[in-house]
Image (cartoon, coloured by chain):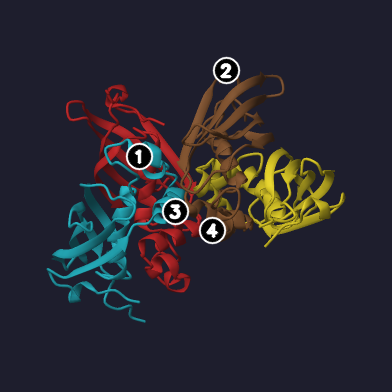
Chain colours: A cyan, B red, C brown, D yellow
């Protein structure tokens, strides 16, 4: 597994990843991070909130962006340098989200690319939007 | 469980959360997000990388910030609006990280606070630094 | 993270923790403990039982009491010494339980507190009731 | 899978279950219950404590008793009614514990047995000791 070096990237290149968010995803993420906010793990309280039910952790959903970056564009060997995200809508348990990443800028000399990032739900509603600065893997490791 | 409304927050308020990152955390996060980048789950390849071993997903570690926000400051009922993060150093399996959040700005009229965020490892090295815009829970829900 | 020393505790102090029990919780607990009693993991058999469906392990639910003790009252640094529990009603997958702990007795000289413990479900039905003897964290560790 | 009805139990009957406690067990239990006490998940802080390292949650270890009860003695169909436990020694990650249960009293008319319970570590040190009141499964379900 080896990602795409900066020389082989072009502005406009895109990649995406989709998944239906399960209760298991949300509960395991709570278990990893310690974030047991009732909005995520208490259905009774969450039903009374503006979200009308349990929602996924924003950082869980944002994690799908790093999935696209780390697995596809630029892929294995990439290093995430910086990230800005806006959380626009909640993701409910059972929602299907698609994270899409697009190459916006290529800075060859510094080996850095700027990626646009959008995550939408099954109704094409934007749930997260942002940018990431990423170092693609180097072309070759000379031996 | 109810978080702190904006009226009760003060600039300089701080809260933190600490955890030793386990291999289990990294593998479950990979399983949730689908980010099976060899840097995280392939010890052989990771040993040959500049990190000299498997490292945690940046977004997993960043998740501890939302733990502090969602559980403590401002706590349950908070809504994460925006987030900017710089990934400064890798976190290895077995590292102990501490995520600290501090109130930097309070915008009473818009019910928004700006939080500074720093995650350090056991050697006090900064691994992630950034800011978050958060809506604290409202003081009361009038019926 | 540091809990409350005995000097700062008062009779009547309370703390609680709530969570909706998921199938994931029950299955992971079965996987950790090896308790694959059909009442917990066999829906077909469990439907024919007096509980009419799979129920959570009593010890899983009882674990929420140690969450309150270890995280809040008295919190980090506390040592659980003894515990007596009555299991009054089953907790079904999907039930939302609230574990509440209250300081009943303070034994300053022996650095021990007796806590009353109640876990209720979303219908305010008691599912577990009991007591715990706990040593709060010491006020300071003199060097 | 069907447990032993009270008519077939004898005073002195024993059963046991053994397992080496892994870091994964402790982290998953923290993730299920929300008990992220540093004694369990922060190696740096735990090293400085009297336990000199991370220890398992007492309730996780106690869970092995319900494994013996629910799987073997009396086995599937048993209902845990009451439990008293003393926590005598910590269990470290990597320790191998054996939970043993023994029939102490048989109350035929009320369909209840009293079980003695001991959990030891690999050095035969008692870590938990206690009693449980259990209702064995009924002999037959007449149709």
Give the residue number, with chain letter if any, for mark 4. Answer: C43
How far apart are the two marked residues, 1 and 2, measured between alpha carbons? 32 Å
Q: CA distance from mark 3 to mark 2?
A: 36 Å
Q: Position of residue D106 (x, y in %)?
A: 83, 44
Q: Quadrant of residue B8?
A: top left
Q: Which chain does the numbered disc 3 sit on?
A: A
What residue is pinned by disc 3? A28
Chain of the residue where label 2 is placed in the rendered structure:
C
Task: Tell me the quadrant of the picture where the C terminus of chain C can be found.
Answer: top right
Instruction: Name the front one of labels 2 and 4.
Output: 4
**What's the CA distance linking mark 1 and mark 4?**
27 Å
SS assignment at label 3: helix
Distance from Cα at disc 3 to Cα at disc 1: 18 Å
The answer to whether residue A49 is above or below residue A83 is above
List the residue tagged with mark 1. Answer: A46
Marker disc for residue C10:
2
């Amino acid at each position: 597994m080896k990602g795409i070096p900066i020389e082989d990237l072009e502005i406009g290149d895109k990649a995406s990843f989709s998944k239906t968010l399960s209760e298991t995803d949300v509960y395991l993420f709570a278990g990893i991070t310690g974030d047991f906010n009732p909005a995520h793990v208490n259905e009774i309280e969450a039903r009374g909130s503006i979200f009308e039910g349990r929602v996924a952790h924003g950082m869980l959903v944002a994690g799908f962006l790093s999935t696209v970056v780390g697995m596809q564009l630029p892929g294995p060997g990439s290093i995430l340098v910086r990230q800005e995200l806006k959380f626009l809508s909640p993701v409910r348990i059972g929602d299907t989200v698609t994270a899409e990443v697009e190459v916006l800028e290529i800075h060859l000399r510094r080996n850095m690319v700027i990626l646009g990032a959008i995550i939408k739900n099954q109704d094409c509603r934007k749930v997260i939007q942002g940018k990431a600065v990423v170092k693609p893997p180097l072309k070759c490791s000379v031996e």
